[in-house]
Image (spheres, helix red, strand yellow):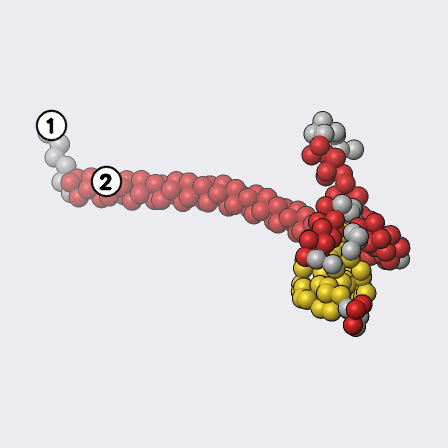
Amino acid sequence: MIKINLLPHREAKRKQLKNDFYTLLLFSAIVAALIIITVGTFFSMRISQQSDRNNFIKAENSKLDEKIKEVASLKQEIDGLKARQQAVEDLQGDRNQPVFMLDELVKLTPEGVFLKALKQDGQRIVLNGYAQSNQRVSEFLRNLGNKSPWMDKPELIEIKSAGLGQGRDAKKVFDFTVNVGIKRPRERDSAAASGAAIINPDIKKP
């Protein structure tokens, strides 16, 4: 006996394929969603970890900045204390300057030169006097520049012809004005140490 299927099997098969397609599509969407959620969670965790690291680094940098500020403040205080200490030492050393200065001038003033005025302005002194000749003034300048550990950088400000006395006692002299620097004890000691190092380069600094 021959059986004939009168049901619309093609429509049923097409409907089954459509249902299978939608099921597969839904499954794929679910799988894709799970993958996206998993990947998103992974990257979110990595970003969170990196953010924690960045925040830690920022916090440590802030601490270091505070420490740097403290060190800079301490350095400024130390520099200020050193400057005040140096000022006190300079004041103590300056008290003896007039003694050294007058003693040096007695040694450095050549014969034929007479000093009549002396004025100090800070670390410079102005000397005014008479000399028998220009050569005597030049010798005086050389002595001030080369033969004294206390005197420094002499400069001839003015020299002019003048007369002393009257009648038979009248003499022609040269009125001069010289400006010369005075070294402080620490400057003199530093210059002496530098000179010794130049003369003997084998000398080691302490």
> Tag 2 or tag 1, which sits nearer the N-term?
1
Residue sitting at x 74%, y 56%? 181
Q: Is any part of residue 66 visible from this angle?
A: no
* Residue at image point 74% right, 43% down: 191
Q: Residue at x 76, y 65 (%)?
A: 171
Percent position (x, y) of residue 97?
85, 55
Tell me what residue is drawn at x 13 percent, y 32 percent. Answer: 3
Q: Quadrant of the C terminus?
A: top right
Q: Which residue, given by chain and number where applicable, does mark 1 sit on?
A: 1
Q: Position of residue 25 (x, y in %)?
A: 31, 43
* CA–CA distance in space, label 1 to label 2: 31 Å
Label 1 vs label 2, nearer the camera: 2
* Residue situated furthest front in the rendering: 168
Instruction: Give how far across and how far down residue 106 sits, in percent.
Output: 85, 53
Depth check, front residue: 137 or 33: 137
Q: Nearer the viewer, residue 50 or 18?
A: 50
| Frontmost residue, 147 versus 11 | 147
User: Please, is residue 176 above or below residue 26 in the view?
Assistant: below
Looking at the rendered structure, the secondary structure element under dot 2 is helix
Relative image position of residue 162 (x, y in whole percent): 71, 68
- Hey, what amino acid is under mark 1? Met
Read off the residue under disc 2. Answer: 17
Most foreground residue, 16 or 153:
153
Q: Is residue 155 left or right of residue 101?
A: left
Compared across the picture, whether 53 is left or right of 74 comes to left
